[in-house]
Image (cartoon, rainbow, N blue to C red):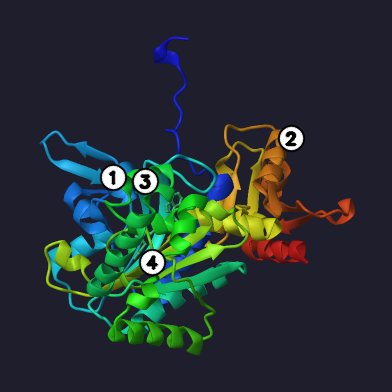
């Protein structure tokens, strides 16, 4: 086969989302957008690519994502750009650029691009839903941001998600901690895994994330961030914890939770699903980033937010309850119109029924009755409407319950003038 005629497929680590699952996407995004509005957030859309400095300064040049995973390219004008690997830095860049009044509450849904080794739950293009709040240090906004994520998971029906919370402290606490961590790691250097033996001094915090046994042992014996928190950061953390408890959001603290980006200060959190495989079980995560606006050239402005991976949410939903997941992605319509008189009748009937709010489809190309009925069955519709020459002549329509088991009661003839009501009634009857 020549290169020219070879079939082209989506790049490694990316996926097409087709109608057999995209209905679940619509429902997840719809639930989130409704809730974000309820919580007082407005949708913010920023470009899919940014000046690479937005991410190098934002998430930190030493972070794994900036070092190894960003899609960086030079455009035709010689600018260095990067496809966004995450949603927070672009939103903060937009905040700095447009100076909106604070607190500024933004929500988004976006693809994110990371050159990772693809595996189940980890892709080179994934999609995130998230929120960011800029302009307040109040720990109660941390609580609301976390609670929004929690209530969202609840609304989706997830029951096996746990919330893990920690505090990284503000920049001074963090520096104190990093210093003692450095001392510890330098004394244990030879015990570290191969990768971190080489990289720990560039960003010692990354070693804490390492899943390898060698690094875990070193980290377990090392200093704890909890001991490095100043009184103010400690109090901030307690207020977040008390707030969560007050509204009944269960949480656990893990002092080893440090997240992958350098912008985090104070509150950090992650939502893990016990229904997913351990290495890719985070369905969401976030935290505070009180320095980020300044790092991107703005005035000092506190911020907090979270992002949640849509693919991971769907994997978790499917793992928790496969049957319920089928309902979530069910794209069945209400009515399928079968017209054996040429197609014009179907055109008018579809228009009438769709305007009445029903989900309606039909066949094209003047197919045979048999072929149209097959298409009706495939569509998942509850009822089919049949129009043949006899019905046309008599001003009637046949309504067929596609799910009825009792052949005798399956069809009925109704006057065309009463079509919408008769179809609605038939759908209700079919649902039992
Ligand atoms: P993150 O933890 O890197 O945080 O990503 C958020 C979520 O996106 C993860 O919990 C996971 O569900 C999903 N995710 C991340 N990488 C992949 C991947 N390669 N494949 C599939 N899903 C993935 C952030 O991106 C921060 N911007 C979150 C945030 C918002 N912090 C403050 N505000």
Give the Cα separation between the discs numbered 2 and 1. Answer: 59 Å
Where is mark 3, residue-wise? 197
Labels 2 and 4: the sequence-earlier one? 4
Q: Helix, strand or loop at disc 3?
A: helix
Labels 2 and 3: the sequence-earlier one? 3
Given the current orientation, which residue lies at the most extreme top position? Answer: 2
Labels 3 and 1: the sequence-earlier one? 1
Where is mark 1, residue-wise? 67
Neighbour tally class for label 4: few under 14, some 14-19, many 20 plus, Cα within 10 Å: many
Q: Helix, strand or loop at disc 2?
A: helix
Where is mark 4, residue-wise? 286
Where is mark 2, residue-wise? 370
Nearest to the eye among marks 1 and 4: give it: 1
Residue 79: image x %, image y %?
13, 40
* Circles 2 and 3: CB atoms closer than 8 Å: no
Q: Helix, strand or loop at disc 1?
A: helix
Ligand 1 placement by image quarter = bottom left
Neighbour tally class for label 3: few under 14, some 14-19, many 20 plus, Cα within 10 Å: some
Q: Nearer the viewer, residue 33 or 381?
A: 33
Task: Find residue 316 and report its image quarter.
Answer: bottom right
> Horizontally, is 275 left or right of 117 in the view?
right
What residue lies at 27% left-to-right and 57% top-to-bottom? 59
> Horizontally, is 366 left or right of 75 in the view?
right
What residue lies at 47% left-to-right and 40% top-to-bottom? 118
Q: Helix, strand or loop at disc 4?
A: strand
Task: Find residue 328 and report its image quarter.
Answer: bottom right
Neighbour tally class for label 2: few under 14, some 14-19, many 20 plus, Cα within 10 Å: few
248, above or below 165, in the image: below
Nearest to the eye among marks 2 and 3: give it: 3
Labels 2 and 1: the sequence-earlier one? 1
């Amino acid at each position: 086969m020549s290169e020219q005629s070879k079939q082209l497929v989506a790049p490694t680590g990316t996926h097409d989302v087709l109608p057999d699952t995209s209905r679940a996407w619509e429902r997840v995004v719809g639930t989130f957008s409704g809730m974000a509005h309820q919580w007082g957030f407005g949708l913010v859309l920023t470009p899919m690519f940014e000046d690479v400095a937005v991410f190098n300064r934002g998430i930190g040049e030493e972070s794994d994502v900036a070092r190894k995973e960003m899609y960086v390219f030079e455009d035709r004008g010689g600018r260095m750009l990067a496809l966004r690997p995450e949603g927070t830095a672009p939103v903060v860049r937009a905040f700095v650029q447009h100076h909106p009044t604070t607190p500024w509450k933004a929500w988004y849904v976006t693809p994110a691009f990371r050159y990772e080794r693809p595996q189940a739950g980890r892709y080179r293009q994934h999609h995130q839903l998230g929120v960011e709040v800029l302009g307040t240090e109040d720990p109660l906004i941390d609580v609301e941001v976390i609670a929004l994520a929690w209530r969202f998971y609840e609304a989706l029906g997830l029951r096996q998600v746990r919330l893990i919370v920690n505090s990284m402290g503000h920049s001074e606490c963090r520096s104190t901690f990093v210093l003692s961590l450095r001392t510890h790691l330098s004394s244990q250097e030879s015990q570290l895994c191969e990768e971190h033996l080489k990289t720990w001094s560039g960003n010692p915090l990354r070693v804490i994330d390492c899943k390898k046994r060698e690094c875990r042992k070193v980290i377990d014996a090392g200093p704890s961030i909890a001991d490095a928190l100043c009184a103010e950061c400690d109090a901030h953390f307690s207020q977040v914890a008390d707030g969560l408890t007050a509204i009944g959001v269960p949480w656990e603290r893990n002092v080893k939770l440090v997240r992958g980006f350098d912008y985090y200060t104070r509150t950090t959190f992650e939502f893990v699903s016990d229904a997913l495989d351990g290495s890719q079980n985070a369905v969401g995560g976030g935290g505070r980033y009180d320095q980020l606006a300044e790092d991107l050239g703005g005035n000092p402005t506190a911020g907090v937010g979270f992002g949640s991976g849509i693919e991971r949410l769907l994997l978790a939903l499917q793992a928790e309850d496969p049957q319920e997941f089928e309902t979530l992605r069910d794209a069945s319509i209400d009515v399928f119109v079968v017209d054996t008189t040429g197609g014009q009748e179907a055109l008018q009937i579809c228009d009438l029924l769709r305007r009445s709010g029903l989900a309606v489809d039909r066949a094209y190309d003047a197919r045979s009755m048999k072929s149209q009925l097959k298409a009706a069955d495939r569509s998942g519709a509850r009822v089919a409407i049949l129009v043949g020459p006899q019905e046309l002549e008599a001003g009637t329509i046949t309504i067929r319950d596609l799910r009825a088991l009792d052949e005798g009661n399956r069809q009925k003839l109704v006057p065309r003038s009463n079509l919408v009501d008769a179809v609605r009634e038939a759908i209700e009857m079919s649902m039992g």
